[in-house]
Image (spheres, rainbow, N blue to C red):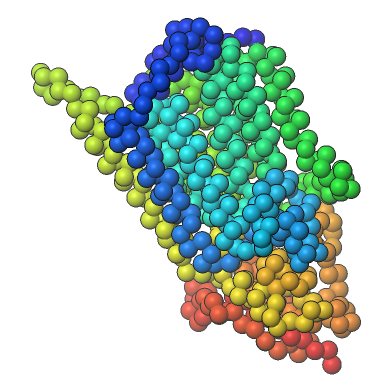
Amino acid sequence: MSRPPYSAEDATAGPGADTSTRTATGPPGTTGAPARPHRRPTAEWVLLTALPLTAVLALAAFLRFWQLTRIGFNSDEAVYTGTAASLAGDPAMQPVFPVFRAHPVLFTGFVSLFLRGGTDEFTARAVAAGVGVVTVAVTYLLARRLYGHAAGLAAALLLAIMPYHVVVTRQVLLDGLMTLFATLALYCVVRYVQAGRDGLPWLLAAAGSLGAAALSKETALVLVCGLYVFFVLSRSVRMRWRDAVLATGLLALVVAAFPLATWVAGHRGTGQNYLQWQLFRRANHPMGFYAVTVPQVIGWAVLAAAVVGLVWLRRRNGWREGLLLCWIAAPVLFFTLWPVKGFPYLLPIAPPLAVLAGRTLGALAGLRMRTGRLRVPTRRLAAAGAVLVALAVALSLALPSAARITAAPKGSFLAGSGGLPGGREAGQWVREHVPGGARLLAAGPSVANVLQFYGGRPVSALSVSVNRLYRNPSYMPVPNPDRSLRDGEFQYLVWDSYTAHRAPFYGAKIRQLVDKYHGAAVYSSAVRVPASSTDPTPTPVIVIYKVRVS
């Protein structure tokens, strides 16, 4: 199969499209392409490009670094930071957080480079936040390449303040780095399509970036399905068999680094155990989970702008829009049907949605209008209107982002949506007051992970299933908690409102064990929230009991 150097749609891209790099003889940098003269930055370039982009990146950094450690780690952050600390050689973390767990270690390995001098919250979260800011810059490059400078600035601004991207990239989670590499891969695919027959290096770069995304989090491989559908359905873009084989081989070679590392380290069964658990574990959310949670954090205004652009500019829709929509549809469909769902799983769709919305805002800036018989150029007026619309959309995102950063703690918790209020304080109390050989039994593994990270004491979880098909292989079950308490295996019980809200049975079970074994509250978290909407009486989110067997 072959394809043209660039599709006919490149010549009719519409307002704001970036056509500066396309010529009749081929793209710059290829045989037959004229050399591009070196031009010094002008005052206009500084004013219209450098300063606005710098301001957008500064805003992105502010929202991601502001009050970064106001609330302590949640369970996933504790695990990933603990794993990074183990890679960095922290002897206190190595017995508790093994290197090889459910996911590849590219992100944790990257974080470990910054933890050589010691493990701390700010450093780990700052790495994730920095990755988020770089993703904003790559989104600008992607949108500018597709639709021009105005669309690039609009897309970067929308992603910079989008609550979904802000909240996730303020946490030590795999999804931020995965999204960065995925967006870079999407940019490389665009360059491949535009470069024509000389685009193979860009396709290989896309394959390498997708491989890095999969080494950050293996779910990135779902995006390959989106690319496959795009190249199959697109009429104006065709991929040659040689290009497809080479790119697939490179992708497989990069992804193979993780199983090879586990094999060399003697953990060949680790991946198999986690795959078995992921395939057979029970659904943790209903099928409509993303339809309820994701649109409001992406921003209804962003979604509306993207849809309006697809309809309004439908005559200009082509391979660009097809690529972005296929990229978005693949993870949305997969994770909607997949029983296991997580709040940050759809983060890779945030940049292309911002690009589609930026396309609409950029096109607004290129409008011209007629007034009566006179043709009146109103580009400046249209540009001012586009700026006002962009600011209105931005405001609809900035306020929720700021509200989520400063939100008061609640008794319930959605994994991946932020830190765990009260967990850091409880863990520090454990470190200072619980004897070194003591063990704790918590209601659920989420709080157990946090207490282990901050407290440095082994913490088991009551809700871990004895059936290996339904439990995370990292966690060991407690088949008979009564006997374990009678035998003195556990000296402390931990109740938390988060597990009690999500799994009331185990919250009640901890209470029963506290009563049965004469538990006395020795710690109550300083963070208090209303017990329920009907009962406004404040209640602690974490309570630690010392038990005694009579």
Q: Position of residue 306 (x, y in %)?
A: 42, 35
Q: Which of these two is toward me, 251 or 218? A: 251
Residue that sits furthest to the bottom in the current view: 550
Instruction: Give the residue displayed 67% in from the left and 51% down from the top.
Output: 113
* Residue 60 visible to the viewer: yes
Q: Quadrant of residue 453?
A: bottom right
Q: Quadrant of residue 509?
A: bottom right
Instruction: Give the residue displayed 53% in from the left and 78% down from the top.
Output: 528
The vertical placement of 522 against 254, above or below, is below
Q: Which of these two is toward me, 320 or 286? A: 320
Q: Which of these two is toward me, 329 or 167? A: 167
The vertical placement of 145 against 46, above or below, is above
Q: Which of these two is toward me, 7 or 94? A: 94
Instruction: Give the residue displayed 44% in from the left and 54% down from the top.
Output: 63
The vertical placement of 82 against 393, above or below, is below
Q: Position of residue 225 (x, y in %)?
A: 65, 30
The vertical placement of 441 against 269, above or below, is below
Q: Position of residue 133 (x, y in %)?
A: 50, 46
Residue that sits furthest to the left in the current view: 373
> Is residue 21 toward the left or the right of residue 424 in the image?
left
Q: Position of residue 109 (x, y in %)?
A: 70, 49
